[in-house]
Structure formats: C-alpha cells, structure tokens
Image (cartoon, rainbow, N blue to C red):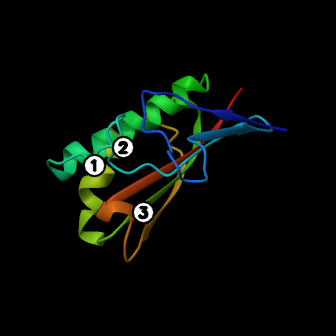
C-alpha cells in the first residue's frame, strides 16, 4: 500500500507522471528536487540560494508527510559538475546533525531545466 504526499509549499509535479513523495512500508520517498520555487519557477540567484531552495522544498514535503530532516535515512545528490560538491556539501550539512543520513553524490551530464543540483531523500517514519 502506498500513499501520495503532496503540498503546495513545494513545486507540484504538474503534467509529469510522478508524485512529490510516496509513503510506503514506514518510509517516505521524495521526488528529486531542483531549485524550483513553490510556484514552479526556476530560482535564479547564487548556487547557495538554489541549494537552500532545494532543501526548503524537501523540508516542506517531509513536513507534509509528518516527518523532518531528523527522520531522513538516505539521500541522493546529483550535480552537473563535481566542482559544486564543496558548496553543496556545506549547505546540505547545515540542515542535518549526527548521525547523518547515508548518501551518495553522483555527477551527471544534465538535469531538468538545466539545474545544477538535484536532491532526493528517503525518511523513516517512526
């Protein structure tokens, strides 16, 4: 059994065939988030601003599911250039405390709307 999670405090999928998040078997699986505003516009600004927007989107989705960053057990980060890793890592770390989630960072050729970073999360609902 799976349950769709949706909030207007983060960008909605629109016509794309996916959900913001799915709750299943005690876990919350988020969509991959890029730096879209809740209205669905690509955020202009610094890389730091963009990463904070991604984290705010994920926070809103997690909160709608009844969890927080404290419940996150796994993240996947996609970057289009490994030179972004240090900045992403610093901002990402500011949203978590030990024990940190398991994580991988993957360098990819491209992301939707030419975004530079995309992050998805899995949280355990206790």
N-terminal of the two: label 3 or label 2?
Answer: 2
> Quick check: marks 3 and 1 in contact, CB under 8 Å?
no
Q: Quadrant of residue 66?
A: top right
Give x and y (percent) for residue 110.
37, 72
Considering every residue shown, the one lying at the far left of the view is 45
> Which SS class for mark 2?
helix
- Closer to us: mark 3 or mark 1? 1
Query: Which labelled disc corresponds to residue 103?
Result: none
Q: Quadrant of residue 10?
A: top left
Per the image, the residue denoted by label 1 is: 42
> In which quadrant of the rendered image does the N terminus lie?
top right
| Residue at the spot 68% in from the left edge and 35% down from the top edge | 4
Query: Which labelled disc corresponds to residue 54?
Result: 2
Distance of mark 3 from mark 1, alpha carbons? 17 Å
When the figure is inspected, residue 21 is found, relative to residue 8, above or below; the finding is below
> Quick check: marks 2 and 1 in contact, CB under 8 Å?
no
Give x and y (percent) for residue 106.
45, 69
């Amino acid at each position: 059994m799976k349950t769709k999670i949706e909030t207007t405090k983060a960008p909605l999928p629109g016509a794309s065939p996916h959900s913001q998040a799915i709750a299943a078997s005690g876990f919350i699986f988020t969509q991959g988030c890029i730096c879209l505003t809740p209205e669905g516009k690509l955020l202009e600004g610094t890389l730091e601003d963009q990463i904070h927007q991604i984290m705010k989107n994920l926070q809103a989705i997690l909160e709608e599911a009844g969890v927080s960053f404290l419940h996150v057990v796994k993240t996947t980060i996609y970057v289009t250039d490994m030179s972004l890793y240090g900045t992403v890592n610093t901002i990402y770390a500011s949203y978590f405390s030990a024990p940190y989630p398991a994580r991988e960072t993957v360098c990819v050729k491209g992301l939707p709307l030419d975004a530079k970073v995309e992050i998805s999360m899995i949280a355990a609902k206790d």
